[in-house]
Image (spheres, rainbow, N blue to C red):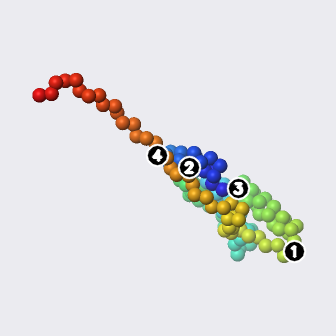
Amino acid sequence: MHRWAHCPGSFALGKVHRHRSASVHAARGTVAHDLVEEALGGPDPFDEVLDRAEGNTVTLDGHDILVDTEMLVGVGMMVTYVRERVEAASDDATIWVEQTVCLDGWFPFTKPPPVVRPAIPVAETKPSTAARP
């Protein structure tokens, strides 16, 4: 759910202020997330995904992210956790990786509030007291 659904003023504020660029930490998390997605939903075995990724540098949002051993350990922990949950759920459980899910039944669409543009200040003008020719 969008932030403006809980705070309508944030929608207008977002139009006035520039968007902050992503931090190196956010970019690193996105790279790790992509590796988890590939390991869970891709055709290649998990070890092949890790071997192929290790030591690579990925440029994302202006940051050069090194896929190092620390990242791959975290990715491995997440993949193992998800697979264990799937196995514990049932014998015919399916992993749905990055699937689009319609939540309209739970969160009906509402239009964002109108953008209220701040008034442009106009300098006050005083009539001239000088005599006109």
Q: Residues within 10 Å of mark 3 (few under 14, many from 20)?
A: some
Which of pointers 3 and 4 lies earlier in the amino acid sequence?
A: 3
Spatial CA distance of label 4 from label 2 is: 11 Å
Secondary structure found at label 3: helix
Amino acid identity at mark 3: Met
Q: Is residue 49 above or below residue 55?
A: below
Contact between marks 3 and 4 (CB within 8 A): the answer is no
Which residue is denoted by mark 2 in the rendering?
11
Q: Residues within 10 Å of mark 4 (few under 14, many from 20)?
A: few
Which of label 3 and label 1 is nearer to you? 1
Which residue is denoted by mark 1 in the rendering?
91
Which of pointers 3 and 2 lies earlier in the amino acid sequence?
A: 2
Spatial CA distance of label 1 from label 2 is: 45 Å
Which of label 3 and label 2 is nearer to you? 2
Which residue is denoted by mark 3 in the rendering?
71
Spatial CA distance of label 3 from label 4 is: 44 Å
Which residue is denoted by mark 4 in the rendering?
117
Residue at 57% from the left image edge and 55% from the top image edge? 112
Q: Which quarter of the figure has residue 41?
A: bottom right
Residue at 68% from the left image edge and 67% from the top image edge? 102
Q: Is residue 82 left or right of residue 57?
A: right
Which of pointers 1 and 4 lies earlier in the amino acid sequence?
A: 1
Amino acid identity at mark 4: Arg
Q: Quadrant of the C terminus?
A: top left
Residue lying furthest left? 133
Residue at 46% from the left image edge and 46% from the top image edge? 117
Which of label 1 and label 4 is nearer to you? 4
Q: Is residue 132 left or right of residue 66?
A: left
